[in-house]
Image: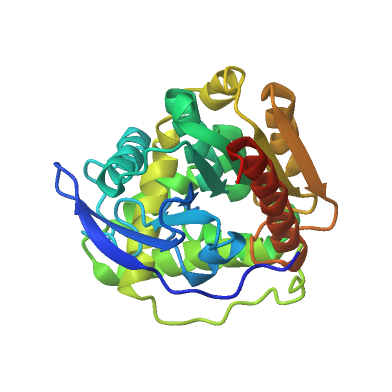
Amino acid sequence: MPIYPEIKPNFSELIDTDDGHRIYVERSGREGGIPVIFLHGGPGSSTNANHRRYFDPEFFDIVLFDQRGCGQSLPKGATNNNTTSHLIQDINLIRNTLGLNQKAVIFGGSWGSALALAYAAQYGESIAALVLRGIFLGSSEEVLWFTNGLKRFMPEAHNQLMWDASDDLVGHYYDRVNAKDIAVAKEACRRWLDYEIQSMMLGSEIADQTKVERREVTNAELARARVQLHYLKHSCFFEKDELLQKAAFISKPAIIVQGGMDMICPPITAYRLHETLPNSKLNLIPSGGHGSWQSKIADALSDEMELLKKSLQANHGN
């Protein structure tokens, strides 16, 4: 089942929090339909027009938002009052502001899968189902794999990442992207994001494109890197194994789509989550990578959303 044609939002707005942030929110599809709330990855990334296209706009009330400091939310790159707990409460703020009283589908990939699980663990009674892709649980083991394990597959890129770093790459880059010297901050940002881009190409249709051309770093990219490293430095504000432990008590249906060749978030994490989540389905795509735009991953997500839509239609009698 192909993804749906591109649509425009019905409206968008900035929702004020009570602690200095303004959250960009957009709504499309069928107002009054089953809400689906899209949680982007990163941490530090943002939403885009393609993220609306996984959902039938004649059935779903589609809500996208940029997390604190991300995308079109303000202030850009802000890390004050920016933790996982804040993001969980922002989801409720958005639901209350938009009047989303029905149980919602929570759809999240990569970091978004971790945030979706954290939300479901706290507010499981308010969700209809989880749809999770490229599972990341915020553990130190996963971060160490990203910063160190991947050198086995992309040694040249890892060598560029090392720069003059110590063993604590996350702490090193956190300090550098927040440096007062903007030239130092932007060079650190370039190296960090180039490494991330190349790692996302592994296991994909464009895996042979291993070089990223040197370029000028934008303020938006610097903001993204600052938010991402803020979360990674603080273990995404989770205790050790917190999400896996909490997942055992999430009873709502959960669909896991995982690329078998995902080098950023290896499938072992998805498998562990599937074993722990009581009502989960694991759709492993053997040759799939990490990115949701990759054709096999996109097709699988679209197919799973169609199956979920039929189930929700049957349950709601429409």
From this viewpoint, is residue 268 visible? no
From this viewpoint, is residue 180 visible? yes
Quadrant holding the N terminus: bottom right
Please state which of residues 107 and 224 is positioned toward the viewer in this rendering. Answer: 107
Kindly identify the residue that appears in the image at 78 percent across and 54 percent down.
261
Quarter of the image for residue 45 reads: bottom left
Q: Decide: is 170 above or below 184.
A: above
Along the horizontal axis of the image, is 67 left or right of 244?
left
Kindly identify the residue that appears in the image at 47 percent across and 39 percent down.
115
Q: Decide: is 126 above or below 71.
A: above
Kindly identify the residue that appears in the image at 30 percent across and 44 percent down.
99
Task: Residue 144 in the image: state x and y as whole percent.
Answer: 59, 41
The residue sitting at the right extreme is 286
Task: Residue 24 in the image: state x and y as whole percent.
Answer: 29, 59
Task: Residue 76 in the image: state x and y as whole percent.
Answer: 26, 61
Along the horizontal axis of the image, is 268 left or right of 100?
right
Q: Decide: is 188 above or below 97.
A: below
Quarter of the image for residue 156 reads: bottom right
